[in-house]
Amino acid sequence: MTLLRRFLDFLYSAAGVLAALCLIAILSLIVIQMIARWTGEVFPGAPDYAGYAMAAASFFAFANALSRGAHIRVSILLNAVSPGPKRLLEIWCFGLGAAIAWYFTYYAYNFVYYSWRFNEISQGQDATMMWIPQSVMVVGGSLLAIALTDNLLHVLTTGDHRIVRDTIESHGE
Amino acid sequence: AEKWDMPMAYSASNFHSENGAEFASCVTKGTQGEIEITTHPGGSLFAGADIKRAIQTGQVQIGERLMSGHQNENAVFGFDSIPFLAPSFDASAKLFEAAKPKMSELLEEQNLVMLYAVPWPPQGLYFNKEVNSVEDMKGLKFRSYNNATSRLAELTGMLPVTIEAAEISQAFATGVAESMISSGATGYDRKVWESLSHFYEVDAWLPYNYVMVNKEIWDGTSEANQGIITSCAKEAEMNGLKASKAYTQFTMDGLAEGGMAVGPAGDALMGELRAIGETMTAEWLEAAGDDGKAIVDAYKASN
Amino acid sequence: MTEIYAIGLFLFVLFLLLGTGVWVGLALMGVAWVGMELFTTRPVGDVMITTIWASSSSWTLTALPLFIWMGEILYRTRLSEDMFKGLSPWLARLPGGLVHTNIVSCTVFAAVSGSSAATLTTVGKMAIPELRARNYPEKMVIGTLAGAATLGLMIPPSLALIVYGVTVNESITKLFFAGVFPGLVLAGMFMGYVALVSFTSKDWNPNVELGMTFAEKVANSRFLLPVFALITVVIGSMYAGLATATEAAAIGVIGALVLALVQGSLTWDSFRASLMGATRTSAMIALILSGAAFLKLSMGFTGLPRSLADGIAAMELTRFQLLMALLVFYIILGMFLDGISAIVLTMAVVEPMVRGAGIDLIWFGIFVVVVIEMAQITPPIGFNLFVLQGMTDHEMGYITRAALPMFAIMVLMVFVLIWFPELATWLPDNMRNGPS
Ligand code: NA
Ligand code: NA
């Protein structure tokens, strides 16, 4: 159990780091493209690659952002009710959230499978096989779904979720 | 009654979109509401790049797409965008007729039925200075948006810079780009006379917008309604061509009124460009294989 | 009748999901899903993925995380303190004191960034702690920030004006010029409001700043040099033709890193913290944008925004009546959609109405921008409210109330634009015409 626990937490953090690397990739791609233009060189497909890195940076970070409390929700009702109903509300939120995330992941998988099966190629100058960048939706979607399910089970068994907000680091207080 | 959603990539006031809206109401009226088509112009439902796949997979029943956008997938889809192969409305109509059987076959394999296609106004060259020969183009920053336009830049000694459509005006205003190849319509819509000075009507190519319907949906449509849709499509094809020609004149006048020098390219420049066109036709034929060769041969035979 | 049923259903599901605390992005997906399942026969899951992939892999979107990252880096430098040191001698003695730094900083950053969310995170991260430390009323701090950050959409460069210009085929350069004066006027109106409150509010007891001689003030302005250097580099790169609006964001990040390095505040830890903070904030916004993209598509399929606009078109109003109707229409739409989606979804019908009424499309672009600026701060779906919630831990209700006066000022701004259309039209009409 603790091994699984540690593995999952590692998974969310590692994906977050991967997302951060994608952000650096966006920066690098844009800078290289600019320098190429200034020096009369060509870097075909740079905007397309930056777009893929953008998607990867978002999807890889979803689960990490969830466990660090960065995804926002309207918590007026959650804060107003007593612990019993609050637990039910949390079960509803995590349950529905997990359902939406799994639904997303399932169709993302279908989408990517279609791209692979029919050999979809990017319409830009990069001519990338689309299933490769699109796979980040499946990976990121399932990580988010796993994280939501993880928290749902936690609420069901212990009564509370595992989201810890990191107010010191990133919320300007 | 069935409701069909028809995504279109260009803004509602564009002649393709207006023509599509007329086609939609023709079908709605003709089938007495049995099939009601709603157009969604301006990429308000799906953006251009997503429309073909959306129709193929039945996310929408019908839609419009610039087919040459898909030439990475199959070079044959770009037959209408080979520079200087069919440089006029009449020549491009012949080329399209020559390609139609092959295109219909390829699209059918992709679960698509072509209803009609309308050409964009011919592509011309925009510059921020007077240009009389390929030599004059050397070193200019040229807006490229796909492999063919990059190759064109390379063959003319210009520097290809990638500028997304949304940033065209700003890119010219700030000198990020100094030249592009596009129809008069693009320059007119983006008011490029604020930054560019010359437009040469070289009629490099006339890319087509296709209106296509999902094949399963088409097969599930009654024969009577198929007939009505086909006749509406024929009408739309004719009206669209007329509108495209009229719009070409309108945008030429508009560019001139905006202060640009508008006119045909000089003979020397045109000769050099045609030579480049032959190189690019040969390169395209290599990529497009037998299907491509069949199209070009049929086109040349029809001349 | 289908429309009223559809509106009611969308609203019910939206309030149910948001109200019970479902994460905003996922709630929007849920609402969109219900709408599509009920009103279309199309395969919902496939449509959802197509549109989410298209919206999340967009190249133009890359400017957003980069500007957010820039804000995170600057927040960890002495830039915020320095900016306060530089600005406070000039602003401290104005009625309203240092709350004006919120508005001035937003106006300045708006000239660098094309989005409201990026302006908000950049300025908010720096300004909130400083103003809190000086004991300014929290509501004023939050409210002015929420409002002034929307200037990011009006003062060029502006993502909203690019989308509008492309949609209605008007010159983006002209639209950018048109936004300059209205942006400054709106900033001035925000500042006027702050001054007014400082006289009338009982909660207004900020720490008193020390008085300075003019020479001291000028000397203190050296602290503004780093900020102005950064802004000059970012804006300069755009206007000198070295970078497009998107690329300028990358220059901003590098400039911020250089600044942090020079100031000695760039350590491995601060670099990592800024990067991870930016990654998570962008992911939060990306999830909401994904949900919003799907909701926009779902509404597009139901034809709802368009039939509402059709309804207005059928009323055959005078020019002023039309503008009032559109104002109300976009305020309502803006409660539920982000502004850019509202433009794309409705312009097909609104554009001919507006052209038909003889309204200048450049001027109307600025009108639309004011209205979608409002959308940023109206509940239940208001991006600035979301971002501020993430940043401050205040409840949506609190932030909404704090931002309400700014909303009222923006409504007033619409009338100012109607009374003095030259605010928007003079600059674009008089800028250089013809080829350079
Ligand atoms: Na801006
Ligand atoms: Na809103």
Image (spheres, coloured by chain):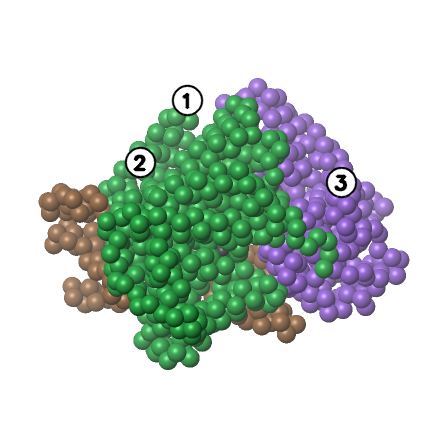
Chain given the colour purple: B
**Same chain letter for marks 1 and 3:** no
Task: State the image coordinates of residue A28 (x, y, percent, origin top left).
Answer: 49, 70
The disc placed on residue C1 is 1
Identify the element where label 2 is drawn: helix
| Mark earlier in primary sequence (2, 1) | 1
Q: Which residue is located at x 54 percent, y 34 percent?
A: C350
- Subunit of mark 1? C
Chain depicted in green: C
The residues tagged by marks 1 and 3 sit, at their Cα atoms, a distance apart of 42 Å
Q: Nearer the viewer, mark 3 or mark 2?
A: 3
Pick whichever, B44 or A107, lies toward us. B44
Subunit under mark 2: C
Q: Residue B82 location in percent, x, y?
A: 73, 54
**Residue A70 sits above or below residue C397 on the image:** below
What label sits on residue C296 in the rendered view? none
Q: Secondary structure at mark 1?
A: loop
Residue occupied by mark 2 = C13
Could you tell me which residue is drawn at 76 percent across and 69 percent down? Answer: B138
User: Any mark on residue B250, and which?
Assistant: 3
Q: Is residue A135 left or right of residue C399?
A: right
* C425 versus C219 height, above or below: above
Both marks 2 and 1 on one chain? yes
